[in-house]
C-alpha cells in the first residue's frame, strides 16, 4: 500500500500518465536529468581535475524473454586525471511500458524520470584515460515487469554507476519485455535500395577499350552489400542494371543507377525516365509532389511514400496500415519515424531530435515496432520501413532485430501491395521548397552538350559505337539520387564528359620547313601525329586563303596508334606567291578532332612550264648550232674508182 501511495504522489509531481497502470509497480524515483551523464550533490565537491566518466550501454537484449535474466554491457571511460573506483551499478527503468513514440522519445531524451529496480555491487578501478567494459547481470527474479498480453512491451532502462562518493554517470536505452501470451503478428518489410555508380572521369573512355558499362567493376561491392542484407522480410530494391540473387530477401528492381525520378519529372525528361525506371520501384529521396507520384504511377512503378508526407487527415491514436491508395492507385506508406531511427536519429514532431548510437538504433527500432503492435493488438496492420540509402551496419542490425521479433511476420513489398488497401483518409503535404542537391536544368543541358562533344571525337575510333554507349551510360549515372548529397561532385564529373584540351591536341599536325610548289598539279606532304593508343580514321583538310592554290578534296586516312604519318593532300597551283595554308584534322562529319597548324608554301606554278621551254629551246639551239657547223666545216672525200678499190682489197 505504501508503494501505491508513493507511486500516486510521484505521478502527480512529475505528471506521468498511467503511473498506476497495471503494467508495472512503482519504485522509488530518481530525479529526471537532462544530460546524457548524471551527477549527484556528492560529486559536486570532487576535485576540479576529476572529470565525470563517460558511461555508455554497449550491449543489451533487444527483447527480454519471459524468465530471462537481464545482462547488460556498459563501457566506462575515465576522462579525468585521477583513478576511478566503481563500487555499484543501479538498474532503473520507466515506470510503465511505452505506448507511443512520444513516451519513447521522452525516455531517450532524459525527460522521463527513472525508477529503481535493482542494484549490483562491483569493485573495478579505472585508470585515467582507460576504458573498461562491465558485464552486469540482473536476475529475472528482481525484474518486476509484467509479460501479459496487454502489459508486455517496450520499456526504458537506465544504468547508473557509483563510487563511494556517489553516482558518477549513467546511460539509457530501450528494451522490449516480451509477452508470455500468444500474439497476432503484423506483416512487415524493410525496403533497402542498392545501387552503385562510378565517379571516374568519363572522357578517359576515349583511349580505353570500350565496354557497355562498368557493371563488372562495381558488382563485387554490390554483391557484398546484397549478401549482408539477405534477410527474410527485407525487400532489396536493386539497380536493375546489376545482376544479383538472394536466398531469403525479396528482390525488386530499382531504377537504373537509382535515377532521380522526381528530378527527371520536374525537368520534363519523360523519355529518359521511361528508359531508366519503367516497372521499377519509386523510393523518393525527398518529399514527393502529387505530380511525382502520378508520374511514377504512369511509369508503372511501385510507389512508396513516407507517412510524414502522406499522413492521415485526422489525428489517430494508432498508426494505420501501410497499404493505401493515391488518386485510386495502390501505394505503400513507409513509417517515417522508425525509418529515421535507422539513420541514428529519433525525430518526433514538436520535439528536439535525439542522436542514437549503434545500440540505441537497434533498441529504439524494436521498441517502436512493439509500440505499433500494442496500439491495436488485434489489428495486424502492415508496417514498412524505408532503409536510408547507404545505411550503416547499425541500421542492418536494427532491421534484422525488428523482423525477428515475435510480434512481426516477415513480408515483402510485393505481398503487401496486393493486400486490401486501408480506407483511412490521407492528405499529401506538398513540399514548399525545391529539393536540395537535385539535378538542375542547366546540368542536364551541360550533359547533353558534353556528350555531343565526346561523340564527335569518339567517331574517329574503330569502336566508336561502344565508346559512345559507355559514355552515355556513365552520363546516365549522373541522374542518381546519390548525387543529391554531393552536387559539387556531380558538377565536377559533368565537366569530365567532354574531351579535354589535351585530348583535342592528341592528334596534331607537325610543322615542316617551307614547301616549294613549282607545278600546277601536285600534293602537299602533311605530317599528322596520332597520340592515342588506338588507330583513328580522320580527314585532313587544307584551308587555302588564295586562288593561287586550291585543294580539290580533303583526304581521309587511318593513322596507326602512337605514330606519325605523312599524308599527301592533292593541290592545284596557279601563279606564284608565298602562302600560309591552315591544316585541319576532322572526323567524317567535319568536326575538328585535332590541333590545327599552318604550312608555309612557296608557290611557283609557272616555273615548270618556263623551265621546260627554256631547257627544250637550249637543247634545240645547241643541236642547230652543231648541225650548221658540221655543214659548214665538213668536206666530202674524193670518189674512189672501182678498179682501185678492187686492187686495194687484193693487196690487203
Image (cartoon, grey):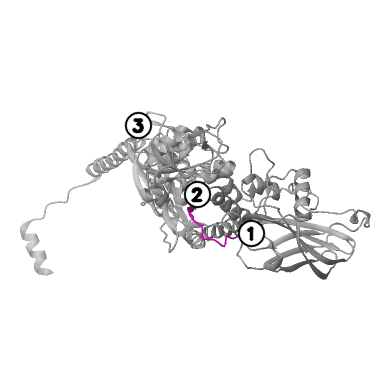
- Between residue 458 and residue 12, name the one nearer to us: 12
Q: Secondary structure at mark 2?
A: strand
- Between residue 393 and residue 565, name the one nearer to us: 393
Crowdedness of circle 2 by 10 Å Cα count: few (<14), some, many (20+)?
many
Direction top: furthest residue: 547
Instruction: Name the residue tied to disc 2.
Output: 384
Q: Which image quadrant for residue 25?
A: bottom right
What residue range appears in magenta? 175-194
Instruction: Identify which residue is drawn at 84% across, 54% down.
Output: 39
Work out which quarter of the rendered image holds the N terminus and state it. Answer: bottom right
Direction bottom: furthest residue: 123
Instruction: Identify which residue is drawn at 47% across, 57% down.
Output: 409
Crowdedness of circle 1 by 10 Å Cα count: few (<14), some, many (20+)?
many
- Closer to us: mark 2 or mark 1? 1
The numbered mark at residue 547 is none
Crowdedness of circle 3 by 10 Å Cα count: few (<14), some, many (20+)?
some
Q: Secondary structure at mark 1?
A: loop
What x and y, as percent, mark residue 102? 65, 44
- Asked whether, in this view, residue 45 is left or right of residue 337, the answer is right
Instruction: Name the residue tied to disc 1.
Output: 146
Q: How far separated are the C-alphas under marks 2 and 1?
A: 28 Å
Pointers 2 and 3 in contact (C-beta within 8 Å): no
Instruction: Name the residue tied to disc 3.
Output: 574
- Closer to us: mark 3 or mark 1? 1
Specify which label sits upstream in the sequence, 2 or 1.
Answer: 1
Specify which label sits upstream in the sequence, 2 or 3.
Answer: 2
Amino acid at each position: 500500500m505504501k508503494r501505491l501511495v508513493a507511486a500516486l504522489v510521484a505521478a502527480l509531481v512529475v505528471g506521468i500518465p498511467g503511473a498506476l497502470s497495471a503494467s508495472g509497480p512503482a519504485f522509488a524515483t530518481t530525479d529526471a536529468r537532462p544530460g546524457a551523464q548524471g551527477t549527484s550533490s556528492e560529486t559536486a565537491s570532487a576535485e576540479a581535475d576529476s572529470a565525470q566518466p563517460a558511461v555508455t550501454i554497449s550491449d543489451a537484449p533487444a527483447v527480454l524473454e519471459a524468465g530471462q535474466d537481464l545482462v547488460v554491457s556498459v563501457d566506462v571511460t575515465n576522462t579525468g586525471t585521477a583513478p576511478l573506483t566503481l563500487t555499484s551499478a543501479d538498474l532503473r527503468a520507466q515506470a510503465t511500458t511505452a505506448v507511443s513514440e512520444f513516451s519513447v522519445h521522452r525516455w531517450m531524451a532524459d525527460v522521463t524520470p527513472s525508477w529503481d529496480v535493482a542494484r549490483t555491487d562491483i569493485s573495478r578501478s579505472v585508470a585515467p584515460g582507460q576504458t573498461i567494459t562491465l558485464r552486469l547481470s540482473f536476475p529475472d527474479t528482481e525484474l518486476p515487469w509484467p509479460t501479459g498480453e496487454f502489459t508486455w512491451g517496450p520499456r526504458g532502462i537506465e544504468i547508473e554507476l557509483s563510487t563511494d562518493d556517489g553516482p558518477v554517470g549513467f546511460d539509457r536505452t530501450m528494451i522490449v519485455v516480451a509477452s508470455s501470451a500468444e500474439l497476432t503478428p503484423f506483416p512487415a518489410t524493410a525496403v533497402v535500395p542498392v545501387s552503385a555508380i562510378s565517379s571516374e572521369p568519363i572522357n578517359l573512355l576515349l583511349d580505353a577499350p570500350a565496354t557497355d558499362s562498368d557493371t563488372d567493376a562495381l558488382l563485387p561491392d554490390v554483391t557484398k552489400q546484397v549478401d549482408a542484407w539477405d534477410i527474410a522480410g527485407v525487400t532489396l530494391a536493386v539497380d536493375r542494371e546489376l545482376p544479383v540473387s538472394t536466398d531469403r530477401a525479396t528482390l525488386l528492381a530499382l531504377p537504373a543507377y537509382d535515377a532521380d525520378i522526381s528530378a527527371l519529372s520536374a525537368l520534363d525528361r519523360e523519355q529518359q525516365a521511361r528508359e531508366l525506371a519503367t516497372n521499377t520501384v519509386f523510393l523518393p529521396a525527398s518529399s514527393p509532389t502529387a505530380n511525382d507520384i502520378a508520374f511514377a504511377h504512369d511509369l508503372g512503378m511501385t510507389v512508396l511514400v513516407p507517412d510524414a508526407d502522406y499522413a492521415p487527415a485526422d489525428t489517430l491514436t494508432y498508426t494505420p496500415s501501410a497499404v493505401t491508395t493515391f488518386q485510386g492507385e495502390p501505394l505503400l506508406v513507409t513509417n517515417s519515424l522508425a525509418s529515421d531511427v535507422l539513420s541514428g536519429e529519433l525525430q518526433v514532431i514538436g520535439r528536439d531530435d535525439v542522436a542514437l548510437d549503434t545500440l540505441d538504433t537497434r533498441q529504439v527500432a524494436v521498441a517502436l515496432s512493439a509500440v505499433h503492435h500494442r496500439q491495436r493488438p488485434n489489428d495486424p496492420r502492415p508496417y514498412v520501413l524505408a532503409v536510408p540509402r547507404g545505411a550503416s551496419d547499425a541500421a542492418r542490425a536494427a532491421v534484422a532485430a525488428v523482423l525477428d521479433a515475435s510480434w512481426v511476420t516477415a513480408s515483402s513489398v510485393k505481398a503487401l501491395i496486393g493486400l486490401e488497401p486501408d480506407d483511412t483518409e490521407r492528405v499529401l503535404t506538398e513540399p514548399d521548397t525545391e529539393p536540395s542537391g537535385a539535378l538542375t536544368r542547366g546540368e542536364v543541358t551541360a550533359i547533353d552538350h558534353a556528350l555531343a562533344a565526346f561523340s564527335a571525337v569518339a567517331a574517329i575510333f574503330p569502336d566508336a559505337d561502344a565508346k559512345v554507349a559507355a559514355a552515355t551510360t556513365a552520363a546516365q549515372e549522373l541522374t542518381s539520387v546519390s548525387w543529391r548529397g554531393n552536387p559539387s561532385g556531380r558538377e565536377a564529373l559533368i565537366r569530365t564528359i567532354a574531351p579535354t584540351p589535351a585530348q583535342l591536341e592528341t592528334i596534331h599536325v607537325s610543322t615542316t620547313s617551307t614547301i616549294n610548289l613549282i607545278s600546277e598539279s601536285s600534293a602537299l606532304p602533311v605530317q599528322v601525329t596520332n597520340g592515342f593508343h588506338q588507330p583513328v580514321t580522320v580527314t585532313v583538310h587544307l584551308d587555302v586563303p588564295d586562288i593561287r592554290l586550291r585543294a580539290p578534296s580533303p583526304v581521309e586516312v587511318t593513322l596507326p596508334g602512337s605514330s606519325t604519318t605523312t599524308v599527301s593532300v592533292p593541290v592545284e597551283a596557279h601563279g606564284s606567291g608565298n602562302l600560309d595554308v591552315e591544316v585541319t584534322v576532322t572526323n567524317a562529319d567535319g568536326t575538328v578532332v585535332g590541333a590545327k597548324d599552318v604550312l608555309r608554301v612557296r608557290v611557283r606554278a609557272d616555273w615548270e612550264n618556263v623551265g621546260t621551254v627554256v631547257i627544250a629551246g637550249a637543247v634545240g639551239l645547241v643541236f642547230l648550232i652543231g648541225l650548221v657547223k658540221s655543214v659548214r666545216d665538213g668536206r666530202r672525200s674524193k670518189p674512189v674508182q672501182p678498179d682501185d678499190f678492187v686492187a686495194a682489197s687484193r693487196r690487203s
